[in-house]
Image (cartoon, grey):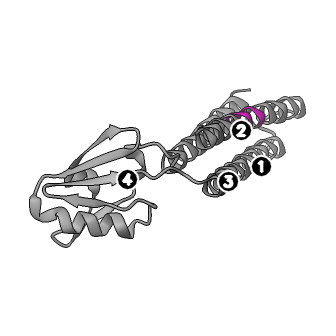
Amino acid sequence: MAIVDDVLTDLRTRIEATLDVLRKEYTRIRTGRASLSILDGVRVDYYGTPTPLSGVANMTVADPRLIIVRPWEKKMIPAIDRALREANLGINPVSEGDVIRLPIPPLTEERRKEIVKAVKSKAEERKVAVRNERRDANEMLKAHQKDSDITEDELKKGLERVQKETDAGIAKIDELASKKEKEVLEL
């Protein structure tokens, strides 16, 4: 049964990694509320090197609709402004002296529906990934049974446990998706 446990442990680890990827993707989705995580993918040209925005400036959420970016070097303001515009976040940066203000516009109903579609699409991609992990785990168990490492009964019980893990992973994906959907649709 140790072989089955090893396969299940590996499956759990892979499903958790898939869930972590989904969580990260969801933090980058704008909800109409200021969140520093939407700036995670922004890279600034810092003397010829693409650098994360957090590596060249302090960022703070001033209020629910405003992010303030305060560069460590004043001469970096144009480069940061350009990087924010090129990141295509749907936010227009406003340079004011030694800070850049990022007013978060309220989302239109149409835009909210588009975002919900994206949320559902990302959830579906992750469900497919979890199902692929299930397939791999099942194939491993069947290979071990073929090599006589486990009995047919152990294989059957193992396949059932793999299905339970898969169902739990998909339920977590659905939970994350509905939570994010609710967040997006909230006014």
Q: Earlier in the sequence, mark 2 or mark 3?
A: 3
Reading the image, the residue beneath label 4 is 39
Callout 4 secondary element: helix
Instruction: Reply yes or no: does residue 171 show up in magenta.
Output: yes
The magenta segment: 167-172
Name the front one of labels 2 and 1.
2
Q: Earlier in the sequence, mark 4 or mark 1?
A: 4
Reading the image, the residue beneath label 2 is 174
Name the front one of labels 3 and 1.
3
Residue 30 visible? The answer is yes
Name the front one of labels 3 and 4.
3
x then y, percent, for residue 174: 71, 38
Name the front one of labels 4 and 1.
4
Callout 2 secondary element: helix
Horizontal arrangement in the rendering, residue 17 relative to residue 113 (left or right): left
Whether label 3 touches label 1, CB < 8 Å: no
Q: Quadrant of the N terminus?
A: top right
* C-alpha gap between disc 4 and disc 2: 25 Å
Q: Residue at x 44, y 60 (%)?
A: 89
Q: Residue at x 60, y 38 (%)?
A: 186
